[in-house]
């Protein structure tokens, strides 16, 4: 911001130029005559180093002691006191850094008083910031003008026509009415160029400027030289003073320009080929966006009661009601740092009077201390319940030190003040700036929008992937720097103070005062204050994945050039007759009002001409709203498919840019939306969220960028199989075709994040601890099923099946039948062999084996196994390990191996053998024999009639 009050009366050591002192200085007091030799000589109100300053000049022949003198702006409560011992030498200069005490606004004053604070020595007022500084020309005695360049603590650079007039544009071929040379005046006052001379590369070709010709400050003048001489394809334009020998400026070229040659930027830049001829006006430069009229209503009106806020209301954020009625307007004041919750009373915005909000709530750092210089405010998609985020420049209690931070506050907290619940100090990552030139604007953009539009992560050098920043929430924070106008995008760790810069963006302005993301259009708005004549710009994500300026707008015709530092837009739901409200906050509180409002057009980019929810860039039939097919083939991709069922949801299918594929945005609804890719037998079932889908042949990748889980549903040989992908997760799989158009399996399943694989009929605990990579489903007959070296889910559907796992951690489920199951992996194995006389053999590892009624033979390797053999005459042999063996009724033979085993059998004549270990044996009803090995063994209930080692 530019106009700031930061402290009570403060004693500051002045900056003194190295002008020698010729005599002992005298001190002026209120009783003395007002010194006539001390004058305000130069004023820097915007972008000074380290901040705003006021320069004094002593035009006298003797030094003057200015100890205790006072400088004020246009507010009598803003007082800067000159340090004791401060003296201005004869014909010397003294620069006073007033910014730690107060800032100078775009419409402000500098006033110099004797120590009594009432005797005025000198003053100067202005209505807008100078492009450079305001200074007296000549020093100490002349009128104030815009200087050529700042000269803090030294003689003013008053320039003059010879230094401020430049050749700006040249037309050498096909001009109207002929060739011409354009001049511009870069100075702050009009330049008289009567009698000046223009020549080409021939000294005998002389064009003399007519008497009485002037160029206004910042103005342009086109000289039609063609009646005197023409400009060639290889020629020069040279500008001389009236003597014809003093060269002011020149430019030479070797061939005609397709348009014209011009400086970019005007008056100061190098010559280049312009994009269009602009005779007598600002040049048209490549990449330059010309400001257009405000895209809305011309009228602006005040929206607060006079005197409600005073100065320093800086940032705005709009919380929508969800409908057409006004919501809540949040505002921050930078000094003292204050957060306001404003409500609409039918004609304007007033502070909420409930819960301590009547005078706003004072803001503090997390420990409850300090006074954050609060400049911008924003909300996330969670609204106030997710916190109110504030961008700050510094701690007003230590106002000379830059402290650019983002703070999070809980607005539901009671009391008249709020301590931050989160703090992100960006000082180390941002450019070094003055204490009063740090973070201004802030806004938040959801991950779903950024990923949908191919936003590029400059930190990783690839497409932005929210999963790369765990704990950052659902979007990125964009902050604008006052010094230089650069915008920075950050992923902020919501559980701590960590952050990562994701992008650096040029706003096109020399300073950014506020930022606003508009979901309805996807625009990132950047607002500048009176420094830029109140212009705003929209930035959009381009084909390269970077935000760039798309349009620049003038302020509304009815808006004065105010120090507007806050900017907020109402949502599309509040559109009336094609326009919706827009709000500004004036940091200077001009005319006693800080809030003003107008309207902006409710325009949105036409991405889906036929309105079928499939954007034109991937719509196979962009003019057929009944057609639900999509493809990114025209964009170089391989993903094609169709929408089977929208489920009553608002569905948008668009190009995912990078990575390839399509992005599906699915709105709220009761029933799922269903998609199917071309060549795929599986369907993709989506809830509310943002989903990336990529297809290549029979291989599909599904990623849940944001929102509710997605489900891949496939029927494999008659058995429904699902892959459920949670938020932030992804799964890739390949479909294996079977006979008769059926799907025989899913292979090469890989995933990131939360993904579960499930088949119909499986118990919830089935396959626990196994990361399934392949799904293999047999038929209903006597099948031979061979697994892979990876982790397989193998399903037998009846009959006498022979299953070989071939390594990995396998999950095998068979139905009734006499099955032979062999697994060889040393990992986790989970087997349910069903009913029948089954033979099960496993490798070493942690095995879980379950069978139903039948005479089963179960053999496991070394490992901690859990075996439930069911009823029947079973033979169980377990390897070394801590095993748990359970059988039903029947005459069972069990060898539990070495380890601390637990064996329980049902009714029947059972035989149990264990090796060394502390075993617990329960033989159940019947005449049983147990032969435990060495160790502390337990015969539960003495139901093992024979219990001998």
Image (tube, rainbow, N blue to C red):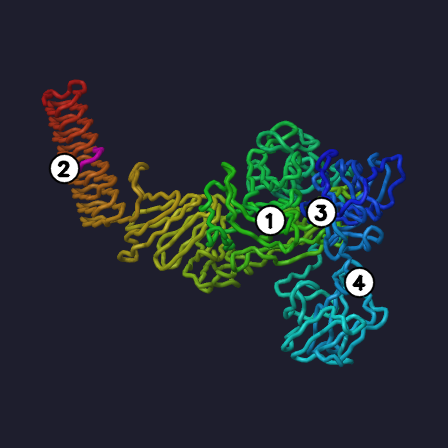
- Choose the circle earlier in sequence order: 4 or 1: 4
**In terms of secondary structure, what is the magenta stretch mainly?**
loop
Q: Nearer the viewer, mark 2 or mark 1?
A: 1
Which image quadrant: the C terminus?
top left
Is 210 inside the magenta-drawn segment? no
Place residue 33 in its image quadrant: top right
Instruction: Say which of 662 and 535 sits in front.
Output: 535
Q: Which mark is residue 564?
A: 3
Q: Which mark is residue 216?
A: 4
- Choose the circle earlier in sequence order: 2 or 4: 4
Q: Residues within 10 Å of mark 1 (few under 14, many from 20)?
A: many
Q: Which mark is residue 857?
A: 2
- Choose the circle earlier in sequence order: 3 or 1: 1
Q: Residues within 10 Å of mark 4 (few under 14, many from 20)?
A: some
Q: CA distance from mark 2 to mark 1?
A: 67 Å
Q: Is residue 167 left or right of residue 208?
A: left
Q: Is residue 746 above or below residue 280?
A: above
- Choose the circle earlier in sequence order: 2 or 1: 1
User: Which residue does the numbered mark 1 point to in the structure image?
Assistant: 517
Q: Nearer the viewer, mark 3 or mark 1?
A: 3
Which image quadrant: the N terminus?
top right
């Amino acid at each position: 911001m530019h106009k700031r009050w930061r402290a009570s009366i403060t004693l500051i050591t002045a900056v003194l130029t190295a002008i020698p002192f010729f005599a002992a200085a005298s001190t002026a007091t209120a009783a003395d005559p007002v010194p006539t030799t001390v004058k305000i000589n130069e004023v820097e109100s915007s972008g000074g180093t380290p901040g705003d300053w006021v320069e004094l000049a002593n035009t006298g022949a003797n030094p003057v002691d200015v100890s205790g003198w006072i400088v004020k702006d246009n507010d009598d409560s803003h007082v800067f006191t000159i340090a004791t011992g401060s003296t201005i030498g004869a014909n010397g200069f003294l620069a006073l850094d007033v910014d730690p005490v107060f800032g100078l606004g775009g419409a402000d004053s500098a006033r110099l008083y004797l120590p009594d604070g009432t005797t005025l020595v000198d003053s100067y007022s202005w209505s807008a910031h100078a492009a450079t500084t305001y200074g007296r020309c000549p020093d100490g005695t002349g009128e104030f003008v815009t200087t050529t360049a700042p000269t803090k603590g030294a003689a003013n650079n008053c320039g003059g026509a010879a230094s401020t007039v430049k050749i700006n544009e040249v037309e050498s071929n096909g001009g109207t009415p002929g060739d011409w040379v354009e001049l511009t005046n870069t100075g702050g006052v009009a330049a008289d160029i009567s009698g000046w001379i223009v020549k080409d590369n021939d000294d005998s070709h002389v064009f003399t400027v007519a008497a009485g010709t002037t160029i206004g400050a910042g103005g342009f003048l086109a000289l039609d030289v063609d009646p005197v001489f023409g400009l060639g394809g290889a020629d020069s334009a040279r500008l001389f003073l009236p003597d014809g020998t003093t060269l002011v400026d020149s430019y030479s070229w070797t061939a005609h320009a397709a348009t014209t040659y011009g400086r970019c930027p005007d008056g100061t830049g190098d010559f280049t080929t312009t994009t269009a001829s602009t005779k007598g006006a600002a040049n048209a430069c490549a990449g330059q966006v010309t400001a257009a009229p405000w895209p809305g209503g011309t009228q602006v009106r005040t929206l607060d009661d006079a005197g409600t806020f005073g100065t320093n209301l800086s940032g705005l954020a709009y919380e929508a009601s969800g409908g057409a009625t006004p919501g809540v307007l949040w505002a921050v004041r930078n000094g003292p740092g204050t957060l306001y919750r404003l409500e609409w009373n039918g004609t304007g915005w007033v502070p909420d009077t409930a819960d301590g909000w009547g005078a706003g709530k004072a803001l503090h750092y997390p420990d409850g201390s300090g006074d954050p210089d609060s400049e911008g405010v924003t909300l996330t998609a969670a609204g106030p319940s997710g916190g109110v985020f504030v961008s700050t420049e510094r701690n007003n209690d230590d106002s000379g030190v830059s402290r650019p931070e983002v703070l999070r506050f809980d607005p539901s907290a009671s009391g008249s003040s709020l301590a931050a619940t989160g703090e992100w100090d960006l000082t180390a990552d941002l450019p070094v700036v003055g204490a009063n030139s740090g973070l201004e604007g802030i806004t938040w953009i959801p991950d779903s929008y950024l990923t949908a539009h191919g936003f590029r992560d400059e930190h990783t050098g690839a497409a932005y992937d929210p999963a790369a920043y765990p704990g950052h929430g659902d979007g990125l924070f964009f902050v604008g720097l006052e010094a230089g106008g650069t915008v920075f995008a950050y992923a902020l760790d919501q559980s701590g103070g960590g952050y990562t810069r994701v992008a650096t963006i040029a706003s096109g302005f020399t300073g950014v005062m506020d930022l606003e993301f508009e979901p309805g259009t996807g625009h990132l708005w950047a607002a500048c204050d009176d420094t830029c004549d109140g212009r705003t710009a929209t930035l959009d994500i381009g084909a390269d994945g970077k935000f760039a300026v798309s349009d620049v707008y003038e302020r509304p015709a009815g808006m004065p050039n105010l120090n507007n530092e806050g900017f907020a837009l109402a949502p599309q739901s509040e559109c009336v007759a094609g326009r919706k409200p827009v709000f500004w906050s004036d940091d200077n509180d001009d005319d006693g009002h800080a809030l003003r409002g107008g309207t902006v057009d409710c325009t949105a980019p036409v991405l889906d001409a036929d309105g079928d929810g499939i954007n034109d860039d991937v719509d196979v039939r962009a003019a057929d709203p009944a057609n639900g097919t999509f493809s990114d083939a025209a964009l170089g991709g391989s993903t094609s498919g169709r929408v089977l069922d929208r489920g009553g949801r608002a569905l948008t299918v668009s190009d995912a840019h990078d990575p390839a594929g399509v992005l599906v945005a699915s709105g709220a609804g009761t029933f799922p939306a269903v998609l199917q890719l071309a060549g795929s037998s599986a369907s993709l079932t989506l809830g509310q969220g943002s989903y990336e889908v990529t297809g290549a042949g029979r291989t599909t990748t599904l990623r849940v960028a944001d929102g509710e889980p997605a489900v891949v549903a496939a029927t494999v040989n008659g058995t429904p199989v699902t892959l459920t992908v949670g938020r932030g997760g992804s799964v890739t799989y390949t479909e294996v075709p079977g006979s008769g158009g059926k799907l025989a399996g899913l292979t090469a399943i890989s995933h990131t994040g939360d993904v579960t694989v499930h088949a119909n009929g499986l118990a919830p605990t089935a396959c626990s601890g196994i990361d399934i990579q392949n799904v293999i489903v047999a038929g209903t007959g006597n099948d031979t099923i061979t697994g892979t070296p990876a982790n397989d889910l193998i399903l037998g559907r009846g009959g006498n099946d022979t299953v070989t796992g071939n390594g990995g951690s396998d999950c095998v489920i068979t139905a009734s039948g006499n099955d032979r199951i062999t697994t060889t992996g040393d990992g986790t194995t989970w087997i349910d062999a069903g009913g029948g006389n089954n033979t099960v053999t496993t490798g070493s590892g942690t095995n879980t084996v379950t069978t139903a009624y039948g005479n089963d033979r179960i053999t496991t390797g070394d490992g901690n196994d859990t075996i439930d053999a069911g009823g029947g005459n079973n033979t169980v042999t377990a390897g070394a390990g801590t095993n748990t063996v359970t059988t039903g009724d029947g005459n069972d033979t069990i060898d539990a191996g070495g380890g601390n085993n637990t064996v329980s059998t049902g009714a029947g004549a059972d035989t149990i053998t264990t090796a060394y270990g502390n075993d617990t044996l329960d033989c159940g009803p019947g005449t049983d024999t147990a032969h435990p090995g060495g160790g502390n063994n337990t015969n539960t209930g003495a139901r093992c009639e024979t219990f001998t080692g």
